[in-house]
Image (spheres, coloured by chain):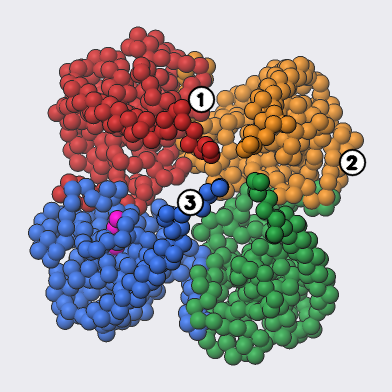
Chain colours: A blue, B green, C red, D orange
Amino acid sequence: MKEIEVEQVAESDLDDPVFVEGLPGVGHVGKLVAEHLIEETDSTLLARVYSEHFPPQVGIDDSGVANLAHAELYAVPTDGRDLIVLTGDHQAGDNTGQYRLSETFLDESERLGAERVYSLGGVPTGELIEEYSVLGAVSSEALIDDLEAAGVEFRSEEPTGGIVGTSGLLLGLGSRRGLEAVCLMGETSGYLVDPKSARAVLDVLQERLEFDIPVEALDDRADEMEEVISKLQDMEAAQSPSSGEDLRYIG
Amino acid sequence: MKEIEVEQVAESDLDDPVFVEGLPGVGHVGKLVAEHLIEETDSTLLARVYSEHFPPQVGIDDSGVANLAHAELYAVPTDGRDLIVLTGDHQAGDNTGQYRLSETFLDESERLGAERVYSLGGVPTGELIEEYSVLGAVSSEALIDDLEAAGVEFRSEEPTGGIVGTSGLLLGLGSRRGLEAVCLMGETSGYLVDPKSARAVLDVLQERLEFDIPVEALDDRADEMEEVISKLQDMEAAQSPSSGEDLRYIG
Amino acid sequence: MKEIEVEQVAESDLDDPVFVEGLPGVGHVGKLVAEHLIEETDSTLLARVYSEHFPPQVGIDDSGVANLAHAELYAVPTDGRDLIVLTGDHQAGDNTGQYRLSETFLDESERLGAERVYSLGGVPTGELIEEYSVLGAVSSEALIDDLEAAGVEFRSEEPTGGIVGTSGLLLGLGSRRGLEAVCLMGETSGYLVDPKSARAVLDVLQERLEFDIPVEALDDRADEMEEVISKLQDMEAAQSPSSGEDLRYIG
Amino acid sequence: MKEIEVEQVAESDLDDPVFVEGLPGVGHVGKLVAEHLIEETDSTLLARVYSEHFPPQVGIDDSGVANLAHAELYAVPTDGRDLIVLTGDHQAGDNTGQYRLSETFLDESERLGAERVYSLGGVPTGELIEEYSVLGAVSSEALIDDLEAAGVEFRSEEPTGGIVGTSGLLLGLGSRRGLEAVCLMGETSGYLVDPKSARAVLDVLQERLEFDIPVEALDDRADEMEEVISKLQDMEAAQSPSSGEDLRYIG
């Protein structure tokens, strides 16, 4: 195997598509959106990307068949702007690999005609949250107004530590190539998979790229997560000692 | 030394052999089976594989002679299907090395005529177990029926985190080469070297590849481990405070 | 992107400049000095250095625009010796990257005419300090007298563990190239960003390179930090149990 | 700088020398012996070896002059067998670097005429010890008798985890080159720099290679360490609660 190997599966006939990335990360926000886009549209797998920089690992599907660690590019047609969606189960395990894979992803998306990049992710708040804001970062100040109009917030020098991983690099390397690049980050506690945050990011994406797909599946997953959280909170409450009694009292 | 160096020791005259891998891993299950196959047959060392990706280390044999970290390929003739068995004391220490060594192992086994790959390992359950199931993963769904007939279990999306290391890569990379690849994983607590789990995997392998070798040595090791576990349990019981007495009682 | 990529932004017309490095490190001492030099002079950005060895990351500026991890070289004219100042938000994440980036920095500074190198950093004392000494290390014993005259201290085999990172390598690699190389290290507790330590290093640098720039901004930051420390100390005092009372007393 | 760079300092006129390695490791045993050999003989620095695989670091000498991380080769003439001694402050920070540097060390020593390799180190026992045994490992069984005659012990499959780092690789890679290679490991607690263990290794080396150098300096360092240990033991004893009093007694 070469350092990075792109296995072409099908040809795309998308018209002026936008490249959308959703790999695993904080709250799995980006990946949830990417998978939702793939599942709720008449999507086509375009290519698999394998690499020595991915973990040395196979995943197992529901019938027991193994697949080597890889990322996938899908053609995702919509009623508005067409998308090329990148998703997968892994990011590269080393800095150099992160850079080289991100360059490969941009090479492929440019080859498929994309001149705009949306990388999706989550930004951790460290606490359970009520209102799901979507934070933005861009390759160029000129992109901000339209994004703010779609509900994206821009905050000075946030996220504080910058944006790490593929989402950050697609923005940074995309910008150096002269592409229009945007990173949308849904606020999330960071502790759990967060379909609500994914929904907030999807809303912005639909608004900005003028497409409309069903969101029920994502909302159902959000409801399921709410139940899980609620159960966890009950369990925690049950484990705390009842106040008013001194268990260490010695008479 | 080159990045990877294959030192040919002898020529193989095996007929249509199956490649079997058993490197160190969970419960040392794969390695126990591989060593048993080598010891209980008229096996021949075919090649040693050295690599900069192995730990910078030598092992010491029983007379004090050192040998540089390496993996070994053996010709293992049986009364049924002949085997090429890979074993050793190490896996590569980095992702890239894991990929490149696995490719080398497949190159060698293909050169020796193998078109089928069985990688062996353990899958940790986290608790001491009574019944030693063998879990399977395959390169192609068509392989499942025959394996189930030989006692292998297939469970949807298990092992949960996929299969990591050489066992996983031989399956994933073997599949991409068009080889028939199977990973057999013996259930094991994961805390101890587990000859019982190895025995379960060996049973499946013998059934599936229609060969028959003595298993007494493996059973003896299993008995020894049972004694060790039993002693550990006695020690643990002795250390726990006897119930009914409050040792922290202050009168 | 290549392994290391130098993006030339402007040409320098500095006369016989000295190369000054201030990347992030202990107490951010070097970076504080470098940024102060850039802000308090009529500085010009000369080049950006990108690399696969930097973290896979973008920083976000105050309007939400992302910039790929990089280091920056500035032309910094002064009333005395002109400077080329290197700063940034990152050091390389691996040994090889540290070596190759340091070589690139030296290549660039030599190309711009610098034959002398000052790398700046902090040396941790582990406790809050009163007097901010500046420790020195040099490529050649002949440089010591003039530095001692400017207030630099030289202590046998200190810092004990040597100098790690870009500051150390510019000294070590610069020395091997035959450059005059000096590392100035401000003593600092090591727990906090330390503008006072930076001020001490700046004083030495001004004295030694005979230039004079306003220091008020750095002193203001030092005052702000003093307030932060003072508040932290108050908080700590408030949390300690009042002496004289035995809280675990059982009557 | 290249990946590995050998800076030749002087030519050797040693006759049929033996290559002796003493880099930092367990108890600094090997390094203590190497430094003692260099200091107690009319030794000459032959070469410095620099590498991107060493830590990105400079050391500081007693006058404040920095030196880039490197290893050193010395010509060490004795009244018996001449030696080429390798020492330094670092081992490579990655597996590949360990392999490539060890190959470079062997290349150099072979170029200088050495056909025999002695790598020196410590083997940790985990407790303070009375009798300082020296454990051996060899490239070939034929070497064992003469070493046992010189007081070296050989124990089956010990050290248990093999020999890690440059000492192990010189043995393993040296053996693959057809060199006579020996690793001598002084038993040491592993907690402290151990000149007594170094003395034991030196004794074996002198006996085996038939040379004789003063050992007083090493014995003096051993006496100093004994005092340090004795003080540490006193401090520990003073900190332990005096027996006979129950400090947690509640009347």
Check disc 2 and give the amino acid type: Asp
Q: Position of residue C213 (x, y in %)?
A: 18, 20
Q: Nearer the viewer, residue D193 or A43?
A: D193
Q: Position of residue A216 (x, y in %)?
A: 25, 81
Pointer 2 residue: D145
Q: Is residue A101 toward the left or the right of residue B64 in the image?
A: left
Q: Position of residue C142 (x, y in %)?
A: 42, 13
Q: Nearer the viewer, mark 1 or mark 2?
A: 1
Query: Which element type, helix, strand or loop, lies under badge 1?
Result: loop
Residue C72 can be seen, yes or no = yes
At 56% across and 65% down in the image, what residue appears?
B165
Q: Nearer the viewer, residue D229 or A171?
A: D229
At 24% across and 39% down in the image, what residue appears?
C47
Marks 3 and 2, how far apart in space? 72 Å
The dot on residue C160 is 1
The dot on residue A246 is 3
Q: Residue A114, relative to residue D142: is it above or below? A: below
Bounds of the magenta span? A121-125
Q: Nearer the viewer, mark 3 or mark 1?
A: 3
At 58% across and 66% down in the image, what residue appears?
B166
Give the chain of mark 1: C
Residue count near mark 3 (Cα–Cα under 10 Å), binned few <14, some 14–19, many ≥20: few
Q: Residue D240, relative to residue B96: is it above or below? A: above
Q: Quadrant of residue A77?
A: bottom left
Residue count near mark 2 (Cα–Cα under 10 Å), binned few <14, some 14–19, many ≥20: few
Q: Position of residue D95 (x, y in %)?
A: 57, 48
Check disc 3 and give the amino acid type: Asp
